[in-house]
């Protein structure tokens, strides 16, 4: 996979080896984590373009568990991504597969989908 960086009058490129399951993640675009949730039990290569690094992630499906989203108690499918630079990342999905909540304990970040969206 080739990442192309553009700046004023400068262009750079960096190549990363990628496998069959490669995803692009960004530390501030949490919706991209849903692509990793589609592959539980599979090793996924994650490429972080801002930091120009990659990591090997494994998604484990922990089944349906209770959590809170927008202060409401709900039961959602819980997956944990391990092996990345952020430590474990917890993903919470609705029954139809929509990503509703992302928790990154190592960064003290919890992101939730707004109600009705």
Image: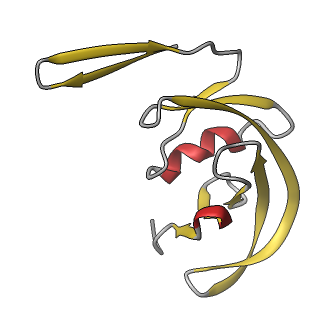
Q: What's the colour scheme?
A: secondary structure
Instruction: Name the foreground residue: 104 vs 9.
Output: 9
Which residue is located at x 44 percent, y 15 percent? 14
Q: Based on the displayed image, in which of its 4 quarters is residue 73 positioned?
A: bottom right
Residue pictured at 67% horizontal, 51% vertical = 97
Q: Is residue 51 above or below residue 16?
A: below
Horizontal arrangement in the rendering, residue 70 relative to residue 41 (left or right)? left
Residue sitting at x 78%, y 54%: 79
Relative image position of residue 33 (x, y in whole percent): 59, 46
Q: Quadrant of residue 56?
A: top right
From the top left corner, tell me how far across and down residue 74 is, in percent. Answer: 72, 78
User: Where, by quadrant of the figure, is residue 36 drawn?
Assistant: top right
Asked whether residue 99 appears in the rendered view, the answer is: yes
Residue 38 x/y as whole percent: 71, 39
Query: 102 above or below 66?
Result: above
Residue 109 appears at what percent x and percent y?
A: 56, 68
Residue at figure coordinates x 11%, y 18% from the top left: 9
Task: Please tell me whether residue 51 is drawn above or below residue 28 in the rendered image.
Answer: above
Task: Judge from the rendering whether residue 66 lies leftward or rightward of residue 11; answer left or right.
Answer: right
Q: Is residue 38 left or right of residue 33?
A: right
On screen, residue 57 above or below 93: above
**Of residues 106 and 35, which is closer to you in this image?**
106
């Amino acid at each position: 996979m080739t990442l192309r960086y553009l700046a004023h009058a400068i262009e750079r490129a960096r190549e990363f080896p990628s496998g069959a399951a490669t995803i692009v993640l960004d530390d501030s675009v949490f919706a991209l984590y849903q692509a990793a949730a589609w592959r539980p039990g599979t090793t996924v290569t994650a490429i972080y373009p801002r930091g120009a690094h990659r990591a090997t992630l494994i998604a484990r499906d922990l089944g349906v568990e209770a959590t809170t989203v927008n202060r409401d108690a709900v039961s959602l499918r819980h997956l944990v991504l391990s092996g990345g630079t952020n430590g474990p990342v917890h993903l919470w999905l609705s029954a139809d597969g929509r990503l509703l909540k992302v928790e990154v304990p190592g960064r003290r970040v919890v992101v939730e989908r707004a109600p009705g969206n």
